């Protein structure tokens, strides 16, 4: 059984929404996997909004399910309200969203992880990545593609480990934890969330935390710098939690869910859960006055925070200051679970002092006597600039090292889980080939103890803002541990008849196309364009969105799950049989659109009707995208008036006017520019 002195095929660092998908995928692929978390009690914790799904996000959840992931099954078993968004619009932009019982969701996720064969949870903190120099040259464009000085909180790694200075591509060999464990591994998936160098802010108060009351992770960012990676700082926030019993709900607008509940998972026949209502309340002029009068006490405005926050989920301070003409803002009052009295105020994120939060909150109708159980706060954290990754989510500098979730600059549970699943699948595929090429790993002898972190004076302890002397000591310790581990494992493999310790295994990664999945769009945007603010998925980012309906995810993606062993032959056959029937129905409807159902299952009949209806539009969309690719080098006049395009989003217009791209292709590569806006620009350039 796995113990203190042991090895693993895959190590997953962090057990949030990305981490559990990565860990479960690798374990289900038959690989010995360790899931390392600072506390097992927080596995898949919903740190912010207690909901899953939404526009584009709901599509991602169904894609995760089609790929053999867990998120859809978890929300089906823990939902307390369901809504199909955009029901008044076409099926291509409809998406499921559900409120979750956050306690039940986390408990189910933990139980799933702890009872899955080949997956072992470990309570510890990873502080170092150990590597060796390989026989493969460092690939071109392995450095960050972002222009120097453009990343918030930017730090360009110096690559001062022996392996990094070799000029060759590095290869993961092990990890080191805060308590001194040295763990030999074949591959690693980093899913650090907001804990990597995390610091929270509440007014004048700040502390090294990843979540309020939970310590941040230090050391790993410095390790990544020594390996040569460029990092930055981003910010997110969360609203106060309120005790339900202190709110007068009779003064609030009720927001019921749908009576028809559609499961997220293709394998769930029906959802049988107690469902509850949400509510809506509004801020007012008095609310805004209190915020404006105290804005200097907000760390966002006092200069304490350097990270960039999510553009589409601003704090209430940002909303009041940026939209001064608005006399109110809508706030969604959402229950956090059936067994807790806490409620979540969606839209009221704040990092103002707690006394100010109390004051402005109590200006809203129904909240005159409201009591906070937890304050709102901002959290700033480190991320790895994502153009340093391949589309497989493997880092270019270090083979076998994969990143997923907020470490790549994204926001949202769904975006994190989608990346975690792809990173996990590819880490597993890499590990399989590593076994064939490199042979066995072995549990380390007792003589290879790592240096445990300690608070004793003069002892080693990774922390924020380490001095040069402390960094040098960390590097010295790391190099010693690296040599000892690598020499030992190289000897183990040679004794077993393998002489490929420094070689990188070839593997065929799972890479999703932009026309196959929103997850594919998300990853392609990150690794191609990078991001300087928390990335959030929208339908407008996907030029092939008519193909990416939430109800067709299994058709597009089940083949990848089957290839990796995350779907059985019977499951894959069932998907193929389903779509063979749909194709048969669609052929009938194209010949006779008004014909009655001759006896097919009603669900199949309705879905085929949608396919037939959208066939022409999808073909037209594909032709537009093809034209866009052909016009890559189309020149944009230096004095082009972007204001002449009335439907252009304000964000895209601002960025285009600031950067003034020379060609359509350059415009398409600007971070944050929507593909729908590029298509609009293409149309206007042809006039």
Image (spheres, rainbow, N blue to C red):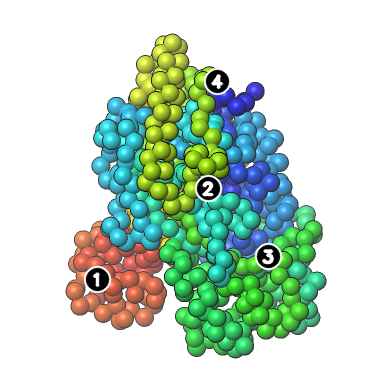
**Image location of residue 9, percent across then percent down:** 51, 28
Residue at image mark 4: 446
Residue at image mark 2: 217
> Closer to us: mark 1 or mark 2?
2
Residues marked 4 and 3 touching at CB (< 8 Å): no
> Considering the numbered disc 1 on the image, is that residue within a helix, a strand or a loop?
loop
> Closer to us: mark 3 or mark 1?
3
Q: CA distance from mark 3 to mark 1?
A: 45 Å
> Considering the numbered disc 2 on the image, is that residue within a helix, a strand or a loop?
loop
Quick one: quadrant of the N terminus? top right
37 left or right of 188? right
Comes first in the chain, label 4 or label 3 = 3
Foreground of the two, 443 or 633: 443
Q: CA distance from mark 4 to mark 3?
A: 44 Å
Badge 4 density bin: few <14, some 14–19, many ≥20, Cα 10 Å: few
- Residue 484 is at least partly visible in this image: yes
Comes first in the chain, label 1 or label 2 = 2
Residue at position x 19%, y 74% in the image: 638
Residue at image mark 3: 374
In the displayed image of the protein, which residue is found farthest to the front?
A: 457
């Amino acid at each position: 059984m796995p113990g203190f002195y042991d090895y693993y095929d895959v190590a997953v660092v962090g057990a949030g929404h990305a981490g559990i998908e990565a860990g479960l995928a690798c374990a289900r692929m038959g690989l010995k996997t360790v899931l390392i978390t600072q506390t097992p009690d927080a596995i898949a914790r919903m740190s912010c909004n207690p909901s899953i799904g939404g526009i584009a996000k709901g599509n991602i959840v169904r894609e995760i399910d089609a790929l053999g992931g867990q998120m859809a099954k978890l929300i089906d078993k823990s939902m307390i309200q369901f809504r199909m968004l955009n029901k008044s619009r076409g099926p291509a932009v409809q998406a499921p969203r559900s409120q979750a019982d956050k306690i039940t969701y986390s408990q189910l996720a933990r139980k799933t992880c702890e009872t899955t064969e080949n997956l072992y949870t470990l309570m510890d903190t990873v502080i170092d990545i150990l590597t060796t120099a390989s026989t493969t040259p460092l690939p071109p464009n392995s450095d960050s593609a972002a222009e120097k000085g453009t990343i918030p909180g930017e730090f360009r790694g110096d690559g001062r480990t022996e392996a990094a200075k070799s000029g060759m591509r590095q290869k993961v060999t092990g990890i080191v934890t805060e308590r001194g464990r040295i763990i030999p591994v074949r591959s690693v998936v980093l899913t650090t969330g907001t804990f990597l160098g995390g610091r929270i802010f509440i007014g004048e108060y700040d502390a090294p935390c990843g979540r309020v009351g939970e310590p941040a992770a230090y050391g790993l960012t410095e390790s990544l710098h020594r390996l040569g990676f460029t990092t930055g700082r981003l910010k997110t926030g969360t609203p106060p939690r309120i005790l339900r019993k202190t709110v007068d709900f009779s003064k609030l607008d009720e927001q019921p869910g749908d009576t028809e509940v559609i499961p997220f998972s293709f394998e769930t026949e029906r959802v049988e859960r107690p469902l509850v209502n949400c509510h809506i309340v509004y801020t007012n002029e008095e609310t805004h006055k209190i915020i404006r009068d105290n804005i200097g006490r907000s760390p966002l405005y006092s200069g304490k925070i350097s990270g960039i926050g999510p553009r589409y989920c601003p704090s209430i301070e940002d909303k009041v200051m940026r939209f001064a003409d608005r006399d109110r803002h809508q706030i969604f009052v959402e229950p956090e679970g059936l067994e807790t009295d806490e409620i979540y105020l969606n839209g009221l994120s704040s990092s103002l002092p707690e006394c100010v939060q109390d004051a402005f909150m109590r200006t809203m109708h129904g909240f005159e006597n409201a009591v906070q159980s937890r304050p709102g706060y901002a959290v700033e954290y480190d991320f790895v600039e994502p153009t340093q990754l391949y589309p497989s989510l493997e880092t270019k500098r270090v083979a076998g090292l994969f990143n997923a979730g907020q470490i790549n600059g994204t926001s949202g549970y769904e975006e994190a889980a989608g990346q975690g699943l792809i990173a996990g699948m590819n880490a597993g595929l890499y590990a399989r080939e590593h076994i064939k090429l490199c042979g066995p790993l072995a549990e380390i002898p007792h003589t290879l103890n790592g240096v445990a972190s300690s608070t004793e004076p003069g002892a080693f302890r990774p922390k924020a803002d380490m001095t040069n002397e402390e960094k040098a000591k960390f590097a010295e310790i790391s190099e010693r541990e690296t040599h000892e581990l690598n020499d030992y494992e190289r000897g183990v493999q040679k004794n077993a008849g393998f002489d490929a310790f420094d070689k990188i295994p070839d593997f065929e990664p799972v890479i999703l196309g932009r026309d196959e999945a929103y997850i594919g769009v998300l990853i392609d945007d990150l690794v191609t364009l990078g991001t300087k603010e928390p990335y959030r998925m929208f339908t407008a980012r996907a030029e092939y969105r008519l193909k990416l309906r939430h109800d067709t995810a299994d058709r597009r993606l089940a083949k990848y799950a089957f290839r990796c062993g995350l779907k059985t032959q019977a499951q894959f056959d069932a998907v193929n049989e389903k779509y063979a029937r749909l194709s048969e129905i669609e052929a009938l409807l194209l010949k006779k659109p008004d014909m009655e159902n001759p006896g097919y299952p009603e669900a199949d009949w309705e879905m085929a009707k949608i396919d037939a209806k959208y066939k022409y539009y999808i073909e037209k969309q594909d032709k537009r995208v093809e034209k866009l690719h052909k016009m890559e080098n189309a020149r944009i006049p230096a004095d082009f008036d972007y204001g002449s395009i009335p439907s252009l989003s304000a964000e895209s217009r601002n960025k285009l006017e600031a950067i003034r791209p020379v060609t359509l292709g350059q415009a398409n590569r600007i971070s944050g520019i929507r593909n729908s806006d590029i298509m609009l620009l293409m149309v206007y350039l042809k006039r």
